[in-house]
Amino acid sequence: MTRLYAIAITTLSVSLALGACAGAPSASQSKPALASAAPAAAPQRTVTEITLPARDGRPLKAVLSMPSGPGPFPVLVAVHGGQGDRSYEVLRNVADPASDAPMVQLFNLKDWIILAPGYRNDWFGAEETDLVDAVRYAAQLPKADPRRVGVFGGSNGGRLTLRAAVLDPTAMKCVGAGSPFLTHPPAFFGDKTQPPWSQISPGAEAWMGATRERLQLAVSRASQRAQQTPEQLLVAHSSQADAAKIRARVLLLTSRADEQVPPVMVQGLIDALARAGNPAEIVAVDKSLHGFYWGREGEFGARAGRGAKTDEQRREEERAHAATLRFFDSCFARR
């Protein structure tokens, strides 16, 4: 399916795209949305549902948002969170101008090609190489500038973004990860009486403990397939342990209120990147919940039962979105 968009975004989104620090809307106001009035200067776009080939020939779903004009354009690969094998609807929500995520709307204001790839629901396996293959595919798209490729993902998408930067260090110039999950699996599956587990809140321990239980079977299956012990497998899939392999610039977004991925679970990666001579750019906020980097509305996931966002949470989201745009603008400005 292909759609053609002439994009117009609300005043809030436009101010963010320009890096402004406008005041946040009140909690009663609706989310930033596509509007017909006060159009911003933005490229006309064609949005298409496609498939791309993985290295073993498996077709992977993807959604492509292509700006009009001759190019060459920078390419942003936008990676959804959660498990793999998702629908085109999920992929559209991280690529389409009509996404309910303000961050995605803002990406579409830029003269960037946006590709949202799917990946297999194959923990510690093909999910990682699927994303690498998607990044390589994106660099070869018509009108793409292969020297200006970036990747952005959140939660599990953030984890896979970092793994792609490890597995193919030259395929991308810059990567951004919001609350990246499992940056160091040995710690996540480690002793709960020791740091970092002993440093997290009861709410975070409940969330993370339930997730850890759900992933035990995936670890067992993946270790058998790889003919490794579980301990060997977890180290082999640690972006923290492999931080020295990452050559791309790195942006990390965290929140002290995030119970799914508390900042202490990411601190080891931050320290490892610094030791490797590639210090990450950090955006740390205080009150926002998991998923703040996308900015979606609604009481689901981490926001279930939490009510409307506060003014402070909205200001934090605006700051995170503006910082993300500045990061990729800076990256793509350098050929």
Image (cartoon, rainbow, N blue to C red):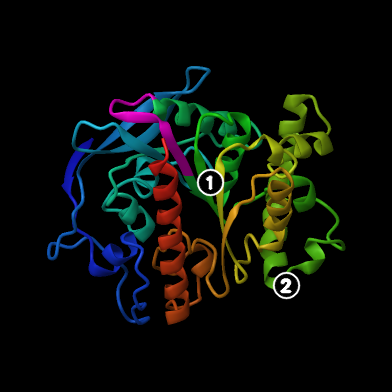
At label 2, the amino acid type is Pro
Please, which residue is most extreme toward the left here? 37
Q: Position of residue 1 (x, y in %)?
A: 23, 35
Q: Is residue 68 left or right of residue 277?
A: left
Please give the name of the residue rendered at 50% of the width and 37% of the height, measured from the top-left corner.
Answer: 173
- Between the C-alphas of marks 1 and 2, the distance is 25 Å
Question: Residue 158: within the magenta?
Answer: no
**Disc 1 residue type?**
Gly
Give the vertical position of 93 relative to 26 (above or below).
Answer: above
Identify the mark at residue 51; answer none if there is no mark: none
Q: Quadrant of the C terminus?
A: top left
In this view, 223 is above or below 271: above
Question: Magenta residues, as a range?
Answer: 140-151
Query: Does residue 81 appear in the picture of this structure?
Result: no
Report which quarter residue 299 is drawn in.
bottom left
Q: What residue is shown with label 1?
A: 157
- Could you tell which of marks 1 and 2 lies nearer the N-terminus? 1
Q: Residues within 10 Å of mark 2 (few under 14, many from 20)?
A: few
Tell me the number on the disc at residue 202. 2
Expressed as whole percent of the image width and height from the top left, the position of residue 34 reads: 22, 60
Between 230 and 96, the residue placed more toward the observer is: 96
* Residue 221: x %, y % from top left: 72, 33
Q: Quadrant of residue 39?
A: bottom left
Q: Residue drawn 20% across and 31% down?
A: 70
